[in-house]
Amino acid sequence: MHDYTMPFGPQHPSLKEPINLALELDGNYITGVKMRFGYVHRGVEKIFEGKDVQKVLYVAERVCGICSYAHSSACTRAMEGILGLEAPTRVKLLRTIVAELERLHSHILWAGFGLHEIGFQSMFMLFWRERERVLDILEAITGGRVHHNYNKLGSVRYDLPKGCEELMRKNIAELEENLPGLIKEFEKNSVVLARFKKVGKISRKDAITYGLVGPMARGSGVKSDIRKIDPYEAYDDIRFNEILEEGGDAYARAKVRLTELGESISIIKQCMSLLPPKPAEKWKWPPIKTGEGFGRVEAPRGEDFHYYEIEDNIVTRGKIRTPTLANIMILEKMLIGAEIGDTPVIVASFDPCIGCMERTMVIDKGKKNWFTESEFRRKFCD
Amino acid sequence: MNFGEEAILNLFRKPFTDKYPFGKKKVLDRFRGWIVYHPKKCIGCKLCEKNCPIGAVKFHKKGKIDFDMGLCMLCGQCGDVCPTQAITYSTEFENAKPKKKFTAKTG
C-alpha cells in the first residue's frame, strides 16, 4: 500500500474550531503528524496594552467562548493582587458559584461533543438539554449566557436577583435527577466503551514530562487541580474531592469530567448555604498603582494563567497561558501509531479550545522563522 | 436510562425547544441587548466614552452620542458608570440589521 498524507481540517465535521493536521499514513495507521495553527489568532495580548485595568477584564473574557468566566477570574485575581484589593466573603462565594456553573456547562458541552464525534446523536441531545438548565441560571445571575461580564475589581456587578435561589434550587434538582442516569449510560454503553477505551493513551510519566493540566493530567493520575494546590475565591472553605483516574485513555478523561459534574453541584450547594445575608456592596473605582503580578485559576480545561504589568492602572504587558496551550504538544505523540478513524475521538478527548490556544504566531521570513524578543521588536515593532 | 422507554415517553411530552419565530422565548430581566440611549437624561460627562473598552462610543455633545453597535460587545460598562442612568439595555436580541442602522435606540 502507498504511503500518503491526508489533511485533517481546518474545516472538518469533527472540529469545532479550525486547526490543520497533516496526517502521514501507512495504510490505516498514522506514522507522522504535522500541526499547523494560526487560523483564529486575534492578538488579544496586544489589545490589552494601553487599556485601563477594569477594561482589560472585559477584553480578557473574550479570549474564549466556553470558559469565558475562567479568563475573567484569572484576570481579576492578577489585578486584585497588584492593586491590593480583597473581595468580601459574599462576593467570593458568588464568584465561586458562577465559576462552578461554568464548569458544569463546559463539561456537559464536552460530553455532548464527545458523543457527537462517535455518532451517538441521541445522547448528545439529552446532555445538551441538561446544559440549557445551567445556562438559564447563568443568564438569571449575570445577564449573559456566554459572556457574563460579572467580575468587577473587588466586587461583582450584581448580587443574586429576586427569585434566583428558587430557580437555582429547581434547576439543580432537575440536574441531579437527570445527570446520573446519563452518566451511567455513558459508562456501560458498548458503543461508547468500544470507541473510548484504550484510545489515546497517556502514561503518568508522559503527563508529567509534557506538563499537562486539568482533566488531561487527572485522567493519567497526576494531581493538578489549582483549586486544591493554590486555593482562590471561596475554595478554601469548601469541601470537595479532586477527581483522579488511572486509565490514561480517552475514557478515563471522559470519566474525570463526568465525575466532576457531581462535585460542581455539591460545591454550588455548599456555597448557597454559606451565603451571608448582607447583600454585596456596589462597585467602587480601584486605587491607582504600579506593579506586576499573576493570577491562576482552574478553568474547566485546566490551569489558566494570566500575567500583567501595569503602570498607573494602565496595562503595559499581558501574557496568557491557556490550558489547551499547555496540553496541545502531546497531540502529536498520541496520534502517532493510532488508527485514522480514532483521530476525532483523540482530538475530542482533549476538549480542545483552539481560539484560546492561538497565543502566538511564527512569521516565516526567508530562512529564519524564530526570533528573540529584541530581534522581533527591531523587525516588526518599530 | 432506558432508551426505549425514553423514546416512548417522548411521544407524549411537550417539545423542550421553543417554536422560535412564532413563540419567542422570554429573556430574563438582566439580559443585555441593544443599547438604549436617553438624551434628555444625559449630562455630557463623557464617562461612557472613556470607559468603553473597545472605543465603540463616540461623544459629540451633550445629548448626542454615537454608539457603534457593530463594534459593541455589550459588556455593560457604559451603563454602569453613567451617573444619571442615561444608558440602559433593552431585551431585544434579534440584532441582525443593515449596517446603517447600527446605532443605539433613543428612548
Image: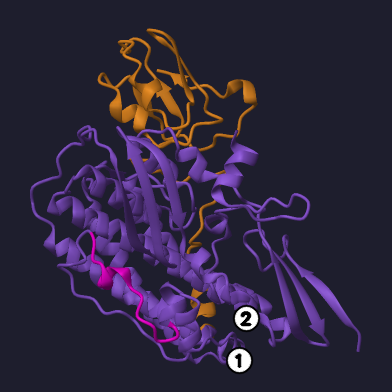
Chain colours: A purple, B orange
Q: Position of residue A96 (x, y in %)?
A: 25, 59
Residue at numbered disc 2? A333
Q: Position of residue A369 (x, y in %)?
A: 70, 55
Q: Position of residue A109 (x, y in %)?
A: 49, 66
Task: Look at label 2 and name its amino acid.
Answer: Lys
Going 28% across and 38% down the picture, which residue do you hit? A290
A119 or A209: nearer the viewer: A209
Instruction: Using the image, name the chain to which the residue with label 2 belongs.
Output: A
Residue at numbered disc 1? A194
Going 56% across and 69% down the picture, which residue do you hit? A328
Image quadrant in which the N terminus of chain A is located: bottom right
Going from N to C along the chain, the mark reached first, 1 or 2, is 1
Q: Main secondary structure of the magenta part?
A: loop
Task: Look at label 1 and name its amino acid.
Answer: Ala
Instruction: Report the span colored magenta.
Output: A219-232
Q: Position of residue A236 (x, y in %)?
A: 17, 67
Rendered view: A221 above or below A41: below
